[in-house]
Structure formats: C-alpha cells, structure tokens
Image (spheres, grey):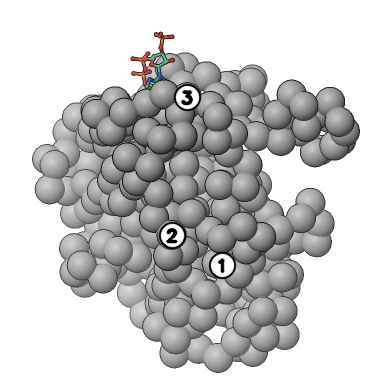
Amino acid sequence: MKKEKPIGITGLGMYVPKKVLTNEDLEKMVDTSDEWITTRTGIKKRRIAQKGVPSSTLAAEAAKKALADAKLKPDQVDLIIVATITPDMPFPATACFVQAKIGAKNAACFDVGAACSGFIYGLVCAKNLISGGMYKNALVIGVEVLSSVTDWTDRNTCVLFGDGAGAAVLQEVKSGGIVSYYIGSDGTLSNLLYLPGGGSRHPASKDTLKNKLHCIKMSGTEVFKSAVRLMTDAATHAVCDANLTCKDISLLIPHQANIRIINSVRRRIGLPEEKVYLNVEKYGNVSAASTIMALCEAVKEKRVKKGDIVVLVAFGAGFTWGSVVIKW
Ligand code: COA
C-alpha cells in the first residue's frame, strides 16, 4: 500500500439494549438447552431491543458516545457510514436517520451492506474517502436489531443472534492508525446465509409472511467451514500487507459469531488465547456491530495500549470477508 497520511480511530462508543435474553430463557421458547448452546457456540446471553425500536436509535446512542470520546461536535462530522443488515427501512439509508437523530447536519450519509463484515467495509470506505481529501471527520457505525429478522421458532438460528451498536470516529492522526486492510467477497456462496423476503426478488406478500421469508436462513455447518478459512485468509493477508507477521499481533478482534470458529482461526494463525478478544458469551452474534462492539470493550478494559497492533477480522453473508490492521 502506498504511503499516505495516517488515518486512525479517535473516538469509540457502543450501546446495547437493556433487555437480556439468556439461554435459559430460550429453553422455554424452543427445544434447546443451555448446555447445547454453550458448547456449540460459546453464547450465554444476548441483548434484545424493545419491539419497534429501530437500528438508528441504537446507532445514534453509540454515535453520540463516540463523538464525545473524540471531542467532536455533531456538526463537525462530514461523513456517516452505517453498516447493517437490519436497516430501519429499505430506504432512506439508516445513516440518514442517524444524521437527523444526532444533528450531524454537514455529513454525507450512506449505508454499506456487507453483513457481518460491514463495519470493516465501512472503515475501509471512510479511510479512503478521508485519504482522498474529501472528508475530515467520519463516523463509522455497525448496528443491528437482528431480533426483528429472527425466526423465534427456529432453534437452528434463534440462539445465535443479538442486538447492539458500536461507533468509531475516524480522522487524520499524527502516527499509527490504519496500516493495511483487505476485503473480499464470493457471491456464489450467497445461498448459505440470507434473508430472502422483502426485496425485489420476493416482495412482501401473504406467501412471504407465511413461509417466513422475512427471517434469516442459514446452512450452519457450511457457514462454519467457510468462516474459518475466510477469516484466517483475510487476517493473514492484511497482516502481510502491513509487512508484519501474525506473531506481531497484539490483539486479534474477530467477528464474534461462535467461539469454536474463533478458536479454529486462532489456532491456524498461531496466536495464544490471551491475544484474542472475546465477548460472544455476552452478546452472541451482532453481525455488523460485532467487531466494533468488541473493539469498544477491549479498549475500555485496557486490553489495547498505545503502539499495539490490533487486527479486526470478520466474515459474513455474501459471502464477504475483511480485515483491518491498526497501529494503536
Ligand atoms: N439446540 C439443540 N439442538 C440444536 C440446536 C439448538 N439450538 N440447533 C440445532 N440443533 C440440532 C440440529 O437440529 C441438528 O440435529 P440433527 O442432527 O438431529 O439434525 C444438530 O443440532 C446439529 O448439530 P451439529 O451438526 O453438531 O451442529 P454444529 O456443530 O454444526 O453447530 C451451529 C451448529 C449452527 C452452532 C454451527 O454450525 C455454527 O455456528 N455455524 C456457523 C453459524 C454462524 O456463525 N452464522 C453467522 C455467520 S456471520
């Protein structure tokens, strides 16, 4: 990657709804057990938004905290990118709703649809738009209200997902910042994880409702195998592009989909457990909000210090994948 002025994260914030749904709660809803969910996924609980509370509400709360952390006023924000698969509506962009909620009247706003890799895709877009000179102060937000697209009668999927939001302010920094990144996709794998209803292919109808086409569909085992391969490849690729090796990683922040996927990636990369951040137990899979919420908590818990090499890595529906190497 050619030498450019450094762009880095200068503020972080996250927000999760108050309501906690535990594995024990799920035992009363579907034929499952805490033991099954814990051993297969590492998830113990997840947060659930109140009915009718849209993604933009969660995103705006996270954004306000990130702006306060960066000591920026809303009208200084000139770009808002929201990564989500649960937008408030098909249009306008959820980023526009966030703009109105936080009063960022000088920002250009758009959403990215790269599922669980969305926050990383958003970071890459914002970094390059700042590097290109168009913008100075960007807000990149990952947010999901996955409870609104979950089939609560399907034990294969309903135990996995949760709601939440995380936000990062991206600006020019004196040193460090994003040193490399790598994003990729394979649309031939789109049938493994998708939400078929409500778009132009299957517009909402009595049939789409009856057949639950407005809910997440997933082939778990196939997703699992591809996830391990693609996250390992993405992290390795980005680390190589930074002229580093995986041994240089201070903290790996993976998409928190499943503890077994994370551990397989960790072993392939050759990292000890203490160099991988985990919060999947508390929140489950929060798709586009996952890596940014994990980064927020890692920083809050002082797991990241100045000069550290932090690697975000994710995969998701599409398939999409991506990794960003940040010198903190
Ligand atoms: N409780 C109890 N049993 C369940 C269950 C649940 N919540 N969900 C599925 N099962 C059952 C299935 O019905 C199946 O039963 P059968 O064999 O009688 O048909 C069996 O468990 C499947 O077991 P197994 O094949 O051992 O599951 P697994 O080890 O593949 O784990 C997942 C299932 C979904 C946890 C795992 O495949 C996974 O995490 N995949 C990736 C999902 C993901 O990360 N998606 C998001 C990507 S961004």
State the CA–CA distance, disc 2 to disc 3: 22 Å
74 left or right, relative to 231: right
Q: Earlier in the sequence, mark 1 or mark 2?
A: 2
Distance (Cα) linking label 1 and label 3 = 28 Å
Q: Nearer the viewer, mark 1 or mark 3?
A: 3
Q: Position of residue 99 (x, y in %)?
A: 68, 76
Q: Position of residue 76 (x, y in %)?
A: 60, 88
The image quadrant of residue 234 is: top left
Q: Is residue 144 left or right of residue 1?
A: right
Q: Pointer 2 and pointer 3: residues touching (CB < 8 Å)?
A: no
Q: Residue tagged by mark 2?
A: 19
**Amino acid marked by disc 3:** Asn
Residue 171 in the image: above or below residue 16: below
Q: Quadrant of ligand 1?
A: top left
Residue in the image at 45% along x and 29% along y: 30
Q: Which mark is residue 59?
A: 1
The reply to whether discs 1 and 2 touch (Cβ–Cβ < 8 Å) is no
Q: Does the beta carbon of the residue at mark 3 sit less than 8 Å from ligand 1?
A: yes
Disc on the earlier residue, 2 or 3:
2
Residue 49 at what x, y percent from top left? 53, 58
Q: How many marks?
A: 3
**Which residue appears at 55% of the width and 91% of the height?**
73
Asked whether 18 or 128 is in front, the reply is 18
Q: Secondary structure at mark 1?
A: helix
Between label 1 and label 2, give the one nearer the viewer.
Answer: 2
Label 2 is placed on what type of residue?
Answer: Lys
Confirm whether residue 179 shows in the render. Answer: no
Report, in whole angstroms, how far the alpha carbon at label 1 lies from the one at label 2.
17 Å
